[in-house]
Image: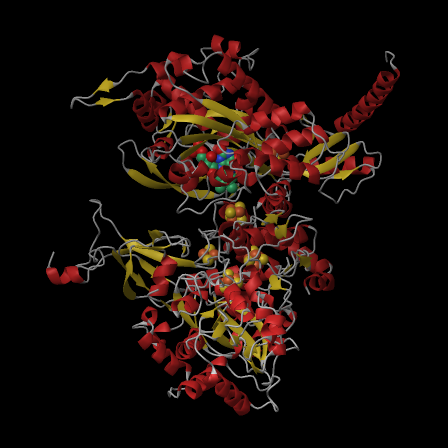
């Protein structure tokens, strides 16, 4: 029986649980922080000692935690790349921009358990010698920002933040920084520019790797809300114990956001890789199945940036057998375990953990037009292919959806989509805006062809006149 | 490893050098090269390609601006030596490196090279990437090239021909923006032609320090703008029209004047201050259309100031002196004029004659003045000119050749201190004769009444002035654009310039008639070209010793002053 | 000049600026504070912010025009943000937008902000509000309304109208010094 596994949502799901610090403390809050701050240097056989901060970083490395913001990059690795010798301050920014359509997990934490995030952040900051950190929260989370502000004040009053935290001599301040409605502020270098008060134009890499040249050209760690909460649990239970949750390359638990045509949309916490798409969409513990008499048509597995899966699609993935050997196998997409590795092996990504389910009532031309309009609206406009390509695609698609397309448009659309991704743009938005177009056009080509054919049959001269 | 192998092993380059291969050609490039501010930073692919003789097309990159990496025109493919499990490079049986091609392209303008790197700038993939960038840049472009001033200098046009697609596939409505924005007193902006390369923003922010331009709106609707109600009005705004790769920023001075391909280009200098910015003069049919900066990293980088750039209209003023004249000259005849002056000078008594020569004259001309002064035993001086300086190029000294005049002993120290002395000596009758070359001394402390006391006054200038009006002989001179020669800038750099247009009427370059005068008065003989006068000068004046005219090249050399 | 900033807003701004190692970082937060106070970002607000943070007005305008949450004209008393993006669209948010526009006499084809003739409502489509599990979502001012239906939208509009009426009466009462 597939089921949820609660770590991050543990308290949130308890009846009567509230956002104030007393409630959090009653539920064992800030114990992980106390534990972290109480760590002592551990002597090594060779006479050296490993300091408390390094111990925490090692636990995070051992935990196998992968970033929950979208890319699934190893958190331990990210921290290990931080330039600790530059003599400059190190900053940490919590990415609470939550703007990948389909994603609403960070909202759960912020609105209902803000202290969990703050505790995770304080630990991460301590482990990385950070003395000033920011929570970059999307502008529309007006209530969320207020809740966090209040929680930060409570934490300050309780001595968890500010000068000389819990008498350890460690100083840290965390401030809220609100965005104002821009998806690109979720991209870590766009976020950094935005936090510097500039247009949120993502930076070129090289040379601007945040771990070396981030906020104010200082080493900077950007982590997602959920990632930072996981850090608290890793310190709580130990990295090795955390790594026992989930599967070897995809450890721990993960929040999955299910929306679209399911009976029970919502945010669920699973052990990574222990639950399949089938479970997530159909099981009573999760999505609860489609609405009556509807058939599954498509799954968007990781926010609208991800390449779509067609229902019934067979995917090939490489798996590790019990004896440790790797082998390739083909399976129905519904049987694919939900984890970073499997979904990407199947040609897409689990991204921000947002699954959008589409049943047979969905008009795929309209769906794609909707997605492309999002990207056209959100492209920051800094680099040529994305700036021009995203709007071009949206315009073609809106025309198709309105019934003014013609067969040649499909090849053109695909060709435009092919001209944007693959490292041609400054940031991964280029991929994000073209992947849905590439995958929907190919996997639902019949539907697109039928749409333009219907137009051509109905009004041949009109459809032609449109493009003249 | 064998010695022979090591010598052409890309991973064993001489210290400070890196071996990279560009389109199959292996070159050694420096590990670091100067960035836009001249700081040594790791050499980029684009620089390495340049050194290998391969130009990578680009829009947003400019060697004198911080790198932005936004146009994506310079995308190239590349590979680096493959590493084995031991983290050591994998080699072929013949010892050559196994190169692992990167699955993703990189922007050449911002990506550093590494030892053994192979850069591919003309693969089908690279060509397709360029083609698509061009297509994207053109879909919302107004395509109004026939009426665009940039035509002929437009990188969009140029690259489209070279790398673009033949026909447009764009059938949607274009994004419309503002086509006629009066950005400031000298610059117009057409937002629709703009490709958002941000060069103009970076220039005015990072080079000038006037953060006046920005991008408003987002995505495809983004547009360059100044804040409403403010004007883009620093002294360097016209450089943005130069560096704008398309016709989005245009000079009001030059707008719709002339198609650029009709212009004759002449290597010259700006003469409006002592910095001596290197310029190109664009002219046609003896008419000057524009000054544009010419790169010289020792002087002006790629820039010039608006004041200097626009300071040429006076050349065509109608009050130019076009023939010799004066109260003692009966006909406008050069021979008579030179003879008359020479005769008067031969009678002049040392100690009773003085010379004022302009610091706008060339080194060679001032050298001739020096010869004359030495022979006549005449004290000399220049007229100083100054104005506010800025911290970029414009210097307080508004004469182009004060330093030359100092090195040649013409200018007093400080320049101009002799002028009141001359005035006093005229008034008390000591100075009986005065020569004025290229100035109006009546505006610099020697009054018309003073001049009336003189036994002899000869003057030259470009325009009629208070001095030429009362002189016994006056001679029409040339603007620097009408002659050849050299100036020495405030930092002691001697630079040459060429003639762009002919002088009006009978006006002749000062060098010509000064030489005649010197020969006539001193009885010495001397070559008549700029080069021969220069030769004589460097043989005599220590500051110019060992500097040959040919050494000056296009960028000049430091004098020993 | 009629533009003046109350002391408490300026104090708030000062404390915001104090959070950052570089004042420029505060610009978006300052703009939020000014918009909260004035209802929109006027040229005076842009210029004041620039002066306050040692910037040029264009630096601020660049941001005001980038971020859709900043508005340069005052909005209605009730600001309805309807999520346009996929999950909400699948759950009928476009029908809601159309319905609201039609009820308020606005153009349903226009996604951008438009204000009803009585100045009471400003309606706009926005991108995903990160609440896709409870689609379709509408924000009315700062409050989020989830799983909206046509009926609930009608109710919401009526409540807003009603609230406005009592506010007006309250205002009147305050002016005339009697209890409402
Ligand atoms: C276009 C784009 C939008 C993104 N939006 C978000 C976001 O809203 N929230 C987030 O946490 N990460 C987002 N990311 C990922 C971040 O760049 C970054 O990888 C992440 O914050 C790192 O945190 P993690 O390592 O904890 O996952 C986005 C990335 C891209 C390219
Ligand atoms: S890819 Fe798009 S979003 Fe990213 S920098 Fe370029 S224009 Fe901006
Ligand atoms: S105006 Fe010219 S220089 Fe400025 S961004 Fe546009 S194209 Fe580039
Ligand atoms: S700085 Fe001086 S030399 Fe250069 S352009 Fe200006 S006036 Fe001419
Ligand atoms: S030249 Fe524009 S990206 Fe390199
Ligand atoms: S799609 Fe509407 S809240 Fe996400």
* Viewer-nearest residue: C137 or B353: B353
Q: Position of residue B11 (x, y in %)?
A: 22, 55
C176 sits to left or right of A383: right
Q: Position of residue A106 (x, y in %)?
A: 53, 27
Q: Position of residue A91 (x, y in %)?
A: 42, 31
What's the residue at 62%, 54% (across, down)? B232
Position of the C terminus of chain A by quadrant:
bottom right
Is any part of residue A261 visible from this angle?
no
What's the residue at 26%, 52% (across, down)? B82
Is any part of residue B71 visible from this angle?
yes
What's the residue at 40%, 40% (across, down)? A213
Q: Residue furthest front?
A: B428
C84 sits to left or right of A414: right
* Viewer-nearest residue: B435 or A42: B435
B535 sits to left or right of B75: left
What's the residue at 15%, 24% (across, down)? A46
The number of discs equals 0
Q: Position of residue C79 (x, y in %)?
A: 73, 31
B194 sits to left or right of A352: right
Relative vertical location of residue C101 with respect to residue A232 in this rendering, above or below:
below
* Viewer-nearest residue: A312 or B184: B184
Relative vertical location of residue A300 with respect to residue B531 in this rendering, above or below:
above
* Quarter of the rendering containing residue C160: top right
Relative vertical location of residue B296 with respect to residue B515 in this rendering, above or below:
above
């Amino acid at each position: 029986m597939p089921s949820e596994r609660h770590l991050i949502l543990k308290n949130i799901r308890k009846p009567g649980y509230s956002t104030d610090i007393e409630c959090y403390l009653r539920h064992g809050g800030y114990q992980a922080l106390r534990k972290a701050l109480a760590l002592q240097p551990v002597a090594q056989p060779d006479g050296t000692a490993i300091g408390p901060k390094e111990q925490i970083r090692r636990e995070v490395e051992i935990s196998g935690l992968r970033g929950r913001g979208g890319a699934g990059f190893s958190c331990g690795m990210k921290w290990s790349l931080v330039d600790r010798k530059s003599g400059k301050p190190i900053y940490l920014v919590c990415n609470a921009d939550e703007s990948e359509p389909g994603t609403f997990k960070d909202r759960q934490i912020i609105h209902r358990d803000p202290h969990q995030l703050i505790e995770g952040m304080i630990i991460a900051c301590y482990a990385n010698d950070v003395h000033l950190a920011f929570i970059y929260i999307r502008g529309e989370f007006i209530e969320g920002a207020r809740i966090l502000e209040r929680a930060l004040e409570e934490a300050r009053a309780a001595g968890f933040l500010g000068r000389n935290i819990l008498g350890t001599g460690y100083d840290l301040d965390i401030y809220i920084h609100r965005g104002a409605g821009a998806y690109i502020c979720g991209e870590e270098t766009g976020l950094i520019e935005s936090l510097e008060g500039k247009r949120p134009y993502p930076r070129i890499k090289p040379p601007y790797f945040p771990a070396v040249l981030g906020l104010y050209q200082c080493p900077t760690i950007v982590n997602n809300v959920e990632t930072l909460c996981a850090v608290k649990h890793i310190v709580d239970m130990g990295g090795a114990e955390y790594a026992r949750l989930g599967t070897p390359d995809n450890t721990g638990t993960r929040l999955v956001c299910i929306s679209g045509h399911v009976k029970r949309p919502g945010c669920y916490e699973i052990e990574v890789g222990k639950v399949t798409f089938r479970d997530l969409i159909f099981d009573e513990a999760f999505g609860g199945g489609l609405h009556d008499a509807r058939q599954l048509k498509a799954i968007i597995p990781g926010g609208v940036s991800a390449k779509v899966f067609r229902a019934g699609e067979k995917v090939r993935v490489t798996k590790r057998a019990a004896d440790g050997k790797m082998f390739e196998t083909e399976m129905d997409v519904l049987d694919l375990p939900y984890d970073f590795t499997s979904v990407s092996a199947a040609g897409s990504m689990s991204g921000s953990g947002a699954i959008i389910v589409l049943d047979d009532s969905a008009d795929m031309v309209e769906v794609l037009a909707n997605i492309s309009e999002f990207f056209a609206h959100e492209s920051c406009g800094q680099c040529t292919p994305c700036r021009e390509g995203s709007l071009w695609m949206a315009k073609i698609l809106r025309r198709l959806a309105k019934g003014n397309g013609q067969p040649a448009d499909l090849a053109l659309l695909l060709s435009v989509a092919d001209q944007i991704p693959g490292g041609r743009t400054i940031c991964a938005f280029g991929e994000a805006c073209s992947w849905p177009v590439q995958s929907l056009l190919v996997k639902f080509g019949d539907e697109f062809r039928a749409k333009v054919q219907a137009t051509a049959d109905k009004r041949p001269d009109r459809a032609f006149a449109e493009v003249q | 490893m064998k010695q022979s192998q090591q010598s052409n092993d890309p991973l064993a380059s001489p210290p400070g050098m890196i071996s990279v291969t560009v389109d199959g050609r292996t070159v050694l490039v420096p590990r670091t090269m100067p960035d836009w501010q001249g700081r040594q930073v790791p050499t980029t692919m684009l620089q390495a390609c340049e050194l290998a003789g391969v130009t990578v097309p680009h829009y947003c990159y400019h060697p004198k601006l911080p790198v932005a990496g936004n146009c994506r025109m310079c995308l190239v493919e590349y590979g680096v030596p493959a590493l084995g499990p031991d983290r050591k490079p994998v080699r072929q049986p013949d010892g050559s490196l196994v190169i692992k091609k990167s699955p993703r392209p990189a922007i050449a303008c911002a990506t550093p090279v590494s030892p053994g790197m192979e850069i591919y700038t003309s693969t089908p993939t690279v060509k397709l990437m360029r083609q698509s960038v061009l297509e994207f840049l053109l879909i919302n472009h107004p395509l109004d090239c026939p009426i665009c001033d940039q035509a002929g200098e437009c990188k969009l046009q140029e690259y489209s021909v070279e790398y673009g697609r033949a026909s447009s596939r764009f059938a949607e409505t274009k994004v419309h923006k503002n086509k006629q924005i009066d950005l400031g007193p000298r610059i117009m902006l057409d937002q629709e032609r703009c490709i958002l390369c941000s060069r103009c923003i970076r220039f005015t922010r990072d080079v000038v320090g006037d953060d006046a331009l920005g991008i408003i709106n987002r995505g495809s609707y983004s547009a360059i703008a100044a804040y409403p109600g403010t004007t883009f009005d620093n002294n360097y705004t016209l450089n943005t029209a130069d560096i704008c790769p398309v016709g989005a920023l245009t000079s009001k001075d030059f707008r719709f004047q002339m198609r650029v391909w009709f212009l004759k280009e002449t290597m010259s200098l700006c003469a409006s201050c002592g910095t001596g910015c290197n310029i190109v003069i664009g002219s046609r049919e003896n008419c000057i259309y524009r000054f544009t900066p010419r790169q010289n990293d020792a002087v002006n980088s790629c820039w010039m100031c608006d004041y200097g750039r626009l300071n040429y209209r006076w050349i065509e003023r109608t009050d130019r002196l076009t023939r010799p004249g004066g109260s003692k000259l009966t006909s406008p005849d050069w021979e008579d004029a030179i003879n008359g002056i020479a005769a008067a000078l031969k009678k002049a008594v040392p100690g009773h004659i003085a010379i004022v020569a302009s610091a706008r004259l060339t080194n060679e001309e001032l050298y001739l003045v020096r010869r004359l002064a030495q022979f006549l035993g005449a004290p000399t001086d220049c007229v100083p000119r100054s104005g506010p300086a800025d911290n970029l190029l414009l210097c307080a000294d508004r004469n182009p050749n004060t330093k030359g005049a100092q090195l040649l002993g013409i200018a007093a120290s400080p320049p101009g201190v002799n002028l009141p002395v001359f005035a006093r000596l005229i008034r008390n009758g000591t100075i009986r004769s005065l020569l004025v070359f290229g100035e109006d001394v009546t505006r610099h402390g020697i009054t018309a009444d003073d001049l009336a006391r003189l036994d002899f006054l000869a003057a030259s200038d470009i325009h009629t002035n208070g001095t030429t009006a009362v002189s016994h002989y006056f001679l029409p001179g040339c603007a620097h654009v009408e002659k050849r020669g050299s100036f020495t800038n405030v930092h002691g750099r001697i630079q040459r310039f060429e003639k762009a247009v002919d002088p009006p009427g009978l006006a002749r370059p000062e060098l010509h008639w000064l030489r005649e005068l010197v020969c006539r008065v001193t009885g010495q003989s001397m070559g008549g070209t700029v080069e021969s006068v220069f030769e004589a000068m460097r043989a005599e004046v220590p500051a110019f010793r060992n500097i040959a005219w040919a050494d000056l090249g296009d960028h000049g050399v430091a004098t020993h002053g | 000049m009629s533009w003046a900033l109350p002391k408490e807003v300026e104090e708030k701004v000062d404390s915001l600026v104090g959070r950052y190692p570089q004042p420029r970082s505060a610009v978006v937060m300052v703009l939020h504070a000014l918009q909260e106070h004035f209802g929109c970002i006027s040229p005076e607000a842009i210029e004041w912010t620039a002066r306050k943070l040692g910037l040029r007005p264009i630096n601020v305008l660049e941001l005001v025009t980038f971020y859709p949450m900043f508005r340069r004209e005052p909005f209605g008393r009730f600001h309805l943000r309807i999520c346009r993006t996929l999950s909400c669209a699948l759950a009928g948010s476009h029908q809601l937008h159309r319905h609201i526009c039609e009820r308020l006499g606005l153009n349903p084809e226009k996604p951008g902000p438009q204000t009803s003739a009585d100045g009471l409502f400003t309606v706009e489509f926005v991108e995903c509000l990160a609440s896709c599990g409870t689609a379709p979502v509408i924000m009315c001012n700062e409050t989020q309304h989830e799983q909206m239906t046509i009926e609930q939208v009608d109710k919401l509009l009526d409540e807003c109208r009603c609230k406005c009426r009592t506010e007006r009466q309250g205002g009147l009462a305050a002016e005339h010094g009697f209890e409402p």
